[in-house]
Amino acid sequence: MGLADLGRIDEVIHGRMRLGIMVYLADVETADFTELKTVLEATQGNLSVHLKKLEEAGYVAIDKSFKDNKPLTRITLTGEGRSAFAAYLEALGRLIGDKG
C-alpha cells in the first residue's frame, strides 16, 4: 500500500479530460459525441484527441454512423475499459486511503 500503488495509476485514464470521459461512461455506458462535449465542456478537437487515446488503449469503442443524414458518433465503454477504470479507482483509493 501507499506509494507503491503510484505505479498502478493508469496514465491513459489519469488526465482530467480522459478521467471525465471514463467517469461519465461508467455511469451511462454509451454516449454520443455531442453529449460528451457538452457534459465535459470540451472543444470538439480536444475531446477527439482524448477519445482517440482511450480508443487506442481499448477502453472505449467508437461507432460512427449517420442519423437523418447527419453524422452520429457514439462512444461506449468496453469491458476492458471498465476493468481498467476499476483498477485505477482501486489504486487511487489505496494511494490516498488509510491516512487516519
Image (cartoon, rainbow, N blue to C red):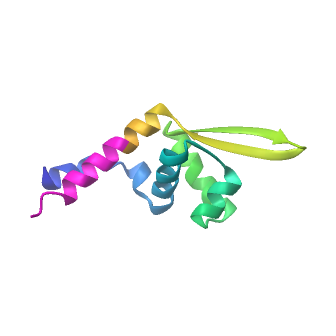
Q: Main secondary structure of the magenta part?
A: helix
- Look at the image and tell me in which quarter the C terminus lies: bottom left
Q: Which residues are magenta?
A: 86-100
Reply yes or no: does residue 60 show up in magenta: no
Left or right, 40 with respect to 16, comes to: right
Residue 94 drawn at (x, y percent): 20, 52
* Residue 95 occupies quadrant: bottom left
- Above or below residue 67? Residue 35 is below
Along the viewing direction, whichever of 25 and 63 lies nearer the viewer: 25
Along the viewing direction, whichever of 100 and 21 lies nearer the viewer: 100
Residue at x 44% of width, y 59% of height? 15
How many numbered marks appear? 0
Residue 13 drawn at (x, y percent): 42, 51
Residue at x 65% of width, y 63% of height? 38
Residue 6 drawn at (x, y percent): 23, 53
Reply yes or no: does residue 87 show up in magenta: yes
Residue at x 90% of width, y 44% of height? 69
Left or right, 28 with respect to 96, comes to: right
Left or right, 44 with respect to 4, comes to: right
Residue reaching furthest left? Answer: 100
